[in-house]
Every structure is written in C-alpha cells, then in structure tokens.
Image (tube, rainbow, N blue to C red):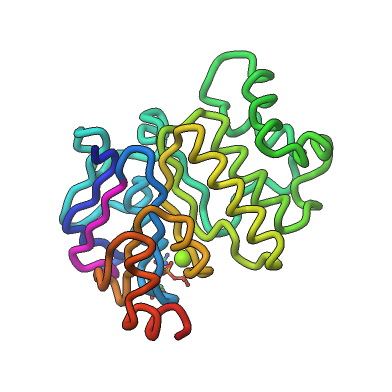
Amino acid sequence: MSLLKAENITAGYGEMDILHGVHMELREGEIVALIGPNGAGKSTLMKTIFGLLRPRAGSITFDGQDITGRSPDRIVRLGICYVPQTDNVFPSLTVKENLEMGAFILNEDLSERIERVYQVFPDLKRFHTKKAGSLSGGQRQMLAMGRALMLDPKVLLLDEPSAGLAPKLVELIFEKIVDINETGVSILMVEQNAKQALKMADRGYVLATGRNRFEGTGDELLNDPQVAKLYLGG
Ligand SMILES: Nc1ncnc2c1ncn2[C@@H]1O[C@H](COP(=O)(O)OP(=O)(O)OP(=O)(O)O)[C@@H](O)[C@H]1O
Ligand SMILES: [Mg+2]
C-alpha cells in the first residue's frame, strides 16, 4: 500500500522552478532510494515533502490523506521525520540533549525512548555526555538519525546519510538503515553512493534536472545499462 506519495510536483525557490512535475511513491515497509546528479533536485523534493517548501503544483499524500502545503511541525506529528543533508545536529548540545530535542513536542519522560535509540546506536550511549560538535562524521550522522527516531516515526526521510564518510562507515550507516527499516519504519533516502543504495533499496528513482528519468526495483536500476552508464559511474 502506498504510504507516502508525491504526484506531479512543481516546486522551487523564489521565481525559479527546480522540480518539474516529479512523482515518487513510498509503500509501507519499503526502502526507496532517490539518486541523481548534483543539483537534480533531490533535496528539494525532500524539503517539499516535509513541508519546508510549498509546491507550486502537484500533491503529497500520506496514508491516503492530502498533506500538501502542511507545515513541518504538523507533518512530524503524523509520523514523518526528516534528517537534512547538513546541519542536522545541535553542535553545542550533548548527544543526550540532542536526542531530547528530537522529542521535545512530547510532554513525557523520554528516558525509555532514549534507551531504545541507544539500542540501535550503542555508540551514542557511550558518548551521551559529549557535545555533538565534537563527534566524528559517522557519529554525528547516527545522532541525527537517532534524534529522528525519538518520535517513533512511520516514515524516515534521510538526505545523504552517508555523505562524506569513509567506506567502512558508509557500510555501517547502511546496516543501521536496514535495521531501522526492519523495525517497521519505511524509508526514503537520497544517496550519492548510488550503487550501494540501490543494492539495499526495494525501489529507486533517478532524478535529473528536476524530472523523473528512471525508476524501478533496485535490481532493475542496477542492471539497466543506461542508468549504469549515466548515473552509476559505468
Ligand atoms: N535555498 C535555495 N535557494 C535557491 N536555489 C536553491 C536553494 N537550494 C537549492 N537550490 C538550487 O536548486 C537546485 C537543486 O538543488 P538540490 O539541493 O535540490 O539538488 P540535489 O539533487 O539535492 O543536489 P546535491 O546532490 O548536490 O545535494 C540547484 O540548482 C540548487 O542550486
Ligand atoms: Mg541534496
């Protein structure tokens, strides 16, 4: 069943359109990878889905409900959490404080939720008193994901979770994403490590210059000679 659906989205900044009628669907339980060259509009699509940008045309539905144009704080309450590409932690706060910020909208004791996040990311427990700004790139990315998990989301939007990480860490982050997905969280992720992302994804979309170029199962895209040549480095 379709959980999150973007249809015919036109969106951009100021007067300029970046997305020209883009579609994307995330079904219950899936991992969907969004790939494509720099500037293709991948982050713009994520921001539009999360309500940070209002689409000029098209619609976004979640669980059959029209959520087009809703603000991020209302979207979060529906169970959609977003981890942006950059600036995704509060550097001057500790790891634990960052996690608490992830669920500040809840008026309840957060210790159980924090423990659950520590089970997914044991490193965060070890570093819980460290300032987020002093973490390594991989740890910071885990913290950003952990913070999003504090609200027990149904959908996680991850914008380049493995960006800038060494290969071993990329692998670790991808393993964590699979673990999170196995707990029942549907995941839409943008990735530059396109081959690896398609290997773990159920389906994928290739965006280029603000338009859908290719889509299919991870395997279909990996085995498509044109996709391989144009977008996967041959
Ligand atoms: N806040 C902004 N104001 C104006 N233009 C922007 C803004 N953010 C992005 N753009 C432009 O929109 C286009 C698409 O950017 P976007 O960040 O969505 O691409 P992307 O596919 O995520 O690329 P990357 O792989 O580099 O992250 C680019 O031309 C970019 O310069
Ligand atoms: Mg981007």
Task: Say which quadrant the C terminus sits in.
Answer: bottom left
Task: Say which quadrant the N terminus sits in.
Answer: top left
Tell me if 109 is positioned left or right of 194 in this view: right
Q: Which quadrant of the picture is home to ligand 1?
A: bottom left
Residue 64 placement (x, y as % from top left):
19, 34
User: With respect to residue 45, does 66 lie above or below?
Assistant: above
Q: State the count of labels.
A: 0
User: With respect to residue 71, does 111 lie above or below?
Assistant: above
Residue 77: quarter of image: top left
Residue 56: quarter of image: bottom left
Q: Is residue 52 magenta?
A: no
Q: Residue at x 48, y 56 (%)?
A: 200
Q: Residue at x 41, y 49 (%)?
A: 31
153 or 51, nearer to the observer: 153
Tell me if 165 is positioned left or right of 34 in this view: right
Residue 101 placement (x, y as % from top left):
62, 32
The region drawn magenta spans: 16-26
Q: Main secondary structure of the magenta part?
A: strand
In the displayed orientation, state which residue is furthest to the top: 108
Residue 42 placement (x, y as % from top left):
38, 64
Residue 136 placement (x, y as % from top left):
77, 56
Q: Residue at x 58, y 33 (%)?
A: 102
Q: Residue at x 69, y 19 (%)?
A: 111
36 or 81, nearer to the observer: 36
186 or 49, nearer to the observer: 186
